[in-house]
Image (cartoon, helix red, strand yellow):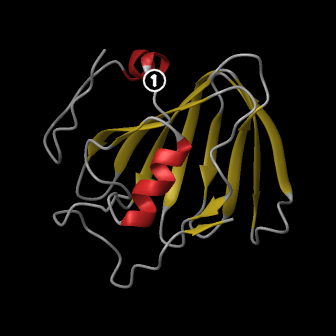
């Protein structure tokens, strides 16, 4: 199943099927004015990467695999620690340091909803290294038509 990000236009597709078929670290599936949907695929033993988004709330849902989610107010104090699996939801408040690690024996398949928009529409990143390179080079910026906070602090990565 190939999903085309149509920007802030109406869209409908089988989200679970798209999530399970996604093989990319991150693929932006839909970008609106106020929120965005990304599909993620995390290989066994790997993680999303410890990060905090000062102005971005997130909702993540696992559709396959087993993971460990850690969150906290600082990167050195991740006092929320929970094992999660297929069907579980993760809610990340803005400004919270968080990471999800694949602790299972199969690829961790999940999707994330960001508010506000966080990535370039339609952006596909095969690996976490690709995503980091795009972010560092400025090649993964929200579209100009999205509504962003007045003061956009940059994300923090450990």
Residue located at (68% from left, 41% from top): 47
Picture quadrant where residue 156 is located: bottom right
Residue located at (66% from left, 30% from top): 88
Question: 88 or 100: nearer the eye?
Answer: 100
- Side (left or right) of 5 relative to 148: left
Expressed as whole percent of the image width and height from the top left, the position of residue 34 reads: 29, 58
- Side (left or right) of 36 relative to 111: left
Expressed as whole percent of the image width and height from the top left, the position of residue 40 reads: 50, 34
Picture quadrant where residue 14 is located: top left
Q: Residues within 10 Å of mark 1 (few under 14, many from 20)?
A: many
Expressed as whole percent of the image width and height from the top left, the position of residue 37 reads: 38, 42
Residue at numbered disc 1: 19
Expressed as whole percent of the image width and height from the top left, the position of residue 148 reads: 31, 71
> Could you say whether the residue bearing mark 1 is in a helix, strand or loop?
helix
Residue located at (34% from left, 57% from top): 140
Residue located at (61% from left, 49% from top): 91
Q: Residue furthest left?
A: 9
User: Is the N terminus in the top left, top right, bottom left or bottom right quadrant?
Assistant: top left
Rendered view: 140 above or below 151 = above
User: Is the C terminus in the top left, top right, bottom left or bottom right quadrant?
Assistant: bottom right
């Amino acid at each position: 199943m190939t999903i085309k990000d149509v920007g802030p236009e109406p869209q409908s597709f089988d989200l679970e099927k798209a999530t399970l078929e996604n093989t990319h670290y991150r693929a932006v599936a839909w970008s609106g004015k106020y929120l965005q949907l990304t599909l993620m695929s995390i290989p066994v033993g790997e993680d999303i990467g410890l990060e905090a988004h000062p102005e971005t709330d997130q909702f993540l849902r696992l559709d396959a695999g087993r993971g460990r989610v850690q969150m906290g107010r600082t990167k050195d104090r991740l006092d929320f620690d929970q094992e999660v699996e297929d069907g579980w939801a993760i809610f990340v408040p803005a400004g919270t340091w968080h990471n999800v690690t694949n602790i299972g024996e199969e690829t961790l398949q999940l999707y994330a909803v960001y508010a506000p928009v966080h990535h370039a529409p339609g952006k596909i990143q095969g690996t976490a290294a690709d995503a980091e390179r795009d972010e560092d080079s400025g090649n993964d910026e929200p579209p100009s038509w999205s509504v962003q906070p007045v003061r956009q602090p940059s994300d923090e990565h450990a």
